[in-house]
Amino acid sequence: MRLVRCAGVVLLLLGLLAGSSFAAGDTAPVQKEVKDWLDAYAKAYEKKDINSIMAMVSPDSSTVFVDNGPQGRHVGEEAIKAAYQAEFKQIKSAVLEYTWLSAASKGDIAWFATELTAKVDLGKQKIEVPGRWTGVLEKRGGKWLMVLSHFSYTASDDEKDEK
């Protein structure tokens, strides 16, 4: 009886170890794929290329983008596209620089968290805005598409010092 219990415990531990190894997996390939996706996004954003950006976004009606703008929530392809169009009308140019990235995946789903600085030219004023961006990507036909996005601006170091 004791041998059966020991064997059961060993099998349970092996199962847990195998499960955690599978869940964690090798994050290096997905880190690179997500970084490549983010770099492509940054290039398209810098060019204000809505068509390239929208090609990176899931066309599903359930796709959700959240930000801290006046509207704040954009659901579905048309609403997301309209949000980009409105944003691009307000800026002359913007360059995104990622300062930190964490990414992982399971199957055809990947998620990331990144910190970045947006260098924005408003025409009469140039500003640097730090932000945080999290997202969920789904791989379809070998291509990663954004299905969920949450972006928020954070306080700059100067604003932190004022508090």
Image: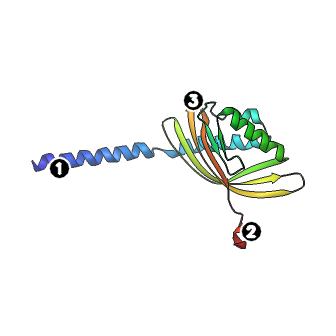
x, y percentage for residue 115? 64, 55
CB under 8 Å between callouts 1 and 3? no
- Which residue has dot 2 on it? 158
Q: Which mark is residue 27?
A: none
Secondary structure type for disc 2: helix
Residue for point 18% across, 46% down: 7
Between label 3 and label 2, give the one nearer the viewer.
2
Q: Residues within 10 Å of mark 1 (few under 14, many from 20)?
A: few
Point out the residue furthest to the left here: 1
Which of disc 3 and disc 1 is earlier in sequence? 1
Point out the residue furthest to the bottom here: 162
Q: Amino acid at mark 3?
A: Arg
Position of residue 125 relative to residue 157, above or below, is above
Point out the residue furthest to the top here: 141
Position of residue 35 relative to residue 138, above or below, is below
x, y percentage for residue 64? 61, 40
Color scheme of the displayed model: rainbow
- Which residue has dot 3 on it? 140
6 with respect to 68 (left or right): left
Between label 1 and label 3, give the one nearer the viewer.
3
Q: Which is more toward the observer, 44 or 163?
A: 163
Q: Which is more toward the observer, 89 or 129?
A: 89
Q: Measure the C-alpha gap from mark 3 to mark 2.
A: 42 Å
Q: Amino acid at mark 2?
A: Asp
Residue for point 65% across, 50% down: 151
Residue for point 56% across, 35% down: 138
Which of disc 2 and disc 1 is earlier in sequence? 1
- Which residue has dot 1 on it? 6
Q: Residues within 10 Å of mark 3 (few under 14, many from 20)?
A: few
